[in-house]
Amino acid sequence: MTAALLDLWSGFGVALQPQNLLWSLLGVLIGNLIGVLPGMGALTAISMLLPLTYTLAPIPAILMLAGIFYGSQYGGAIGAILLNMPSHPPHAVTCLDGYPMTMQGRGGAALGVTMIASFFAASVGIIVMIFASPLLVRVAFEFGPPEICAVMLLGLTAGATMGRGSALKGVSMTALGLLLGIVGTDVNSGIARLTFGVTELRSGIELVALAMGLFGVADFINTVNRMAPITSRAKVRFRDMRPTRAELKMAVYPMMRGTLIGTLFGAMPGTGPTITTFIAYAVERRIARDPGRFGRGAIEGVASPEAAAHAKTQVDFIPTMSLGIPGDAVMALILGALLIQGIQPGPQLIREHPDLFWGLIASFWVGNVLLILLNVPLIGVWVKMLQVPYRFLFPSALLFIAIGVYASGNSLFAVAEVLAFGLLGAVLLALDFPIATILLGYVLGPLIEENFRRALILSHGDLAIFIEHRISAAFLLVCGVIVAAQATMVMRSRLSLGRSATQEAGHAR
């Protein structure tokens, strides 16, 4: 422990060097701004700035990209809470309760809780990186295809119950997400699936297009006739960002649970932050005394997913730096930046490049402090965006969406996908379907399929491999419990409705 603290102290010496601090500040600022803009995200920003790393030294280059990464996390939360537009897919869950809080005049409290949750979760994630990195790497090695498949199935099962309406609607939307997830070319056979002869679909449906269409464009379509500004509902001042004591009390334990979930998933290579936030939200809704509050402005629905996202963001660097296995597309870009600098990620990185590793860890704390200092004065700028009437605000937002989606893949077809999913999302919202579970099915479906196939290859087609492995068996048992609990709730509901109908019929006679 003493050695780790000494290494961390030397890391602060690296991170606080003027040139490194300047590049960290630039990364955090760019990430925050990009995160707020609808249609833009860390993936777009890092991909555009990746060529800049050719001209920088390794440490400032990685510190800048890391700053963009976790800076965009908080910026994405601002867009999700104030505008109902998640520029980064993990914040799609934040829209479910964050935006209703804004419409209730509690947007400031949602932002304040987000800021507290992000700093707390990031700090825990950093501490985990310092002291538990070797242990988490060993735990990650315990997760083979059966274990990963089982945990993804657990996330899918829990996610299907997130909708506040009919459980059947939640399951049907999850199934729709699964169908969308398998569109494209099958990796094993090379056969095009569900492309209907459209060449552009052979590479699959764009995640950014799906997320922005279902959440951003669909909301615009549903509110297109609203001509008045919404400043009275979205007015947020600095003092409004201080949650009440009751709100903090309600958010503390969800924040801790979200941090724990984000930390655990951060240690697993190949799992992105989107899965983490969905599972954190599903857990909170499952254990809540009144699940009906979720989707209507429950502060727990903001605190837990945001804590999970920020903890995941920090701990994500463990498999990337220690194993060379990126957790998602953004970490893959950062991995590419390391390789551009001639640095090979892996177990030897800490020994061969201690200044880079410990400087990066120290910069996380520095960067998160900078985020708080930046967002306190800049929150007024984000709120000003909501003082524009809808007839000006949302066309501008659509323009940013189109630019961001096009920039992410240089494809006009992706822009058309956004429009198509926006129309679909508007119809589903009008019918009161939970559209968030579509995104969950889309993300988890391919991962479940891939790891299911790998597990069967390892076992020569024997399904018993999922039971023989203790970790996967435990996750499958939890899945069974969730399904049984949901079925019991549905049966009880139907029985109570039947009794009520019988009693009403008796009174009528």
Image: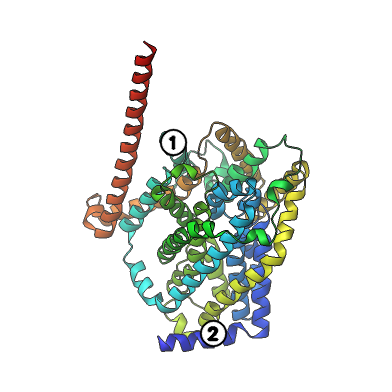
According to the image, label 2 marks what residue? Answer: 11
Q: In which quarter of the image is the C terminus?
A: top left
Q: Mark 2 near mark 1, Cβ–Cβ under 8 Å?
A: no
Residue 82, above or below 166: below
Residue 172 marker: 1
What type is the residue that disc 2 sits on? Gly
User: What percent of the width, then of the height, locates residue 309?
Assistant: 51, 60
Task: Say few, some or many: other residues with alpha carbon within 10 Å of mark 2 (under 14 / 14 to 19 / 20 or more).
Answer: many
Label 2 or label 1, whichever comes before in sequence order? 2
Nearest to the observer: residue 136 or residue 352: 136
User: What percent of the width, then of the height, locates residue 453?
Assistant: 34, 51
Label 1 secondary element: helix
Q: In the drawing, does residue 6 fall left or right of residue 429?
A: left
Q: Quadrant of the N terminus?
A: bottom left
> Can the viewer see residue 274?
yes
Q: Which colour scheme is used?
A: rainbow
What type is the residue that disc 1 sits on? Ser
Quarter of the view holding residue 145: bottom left
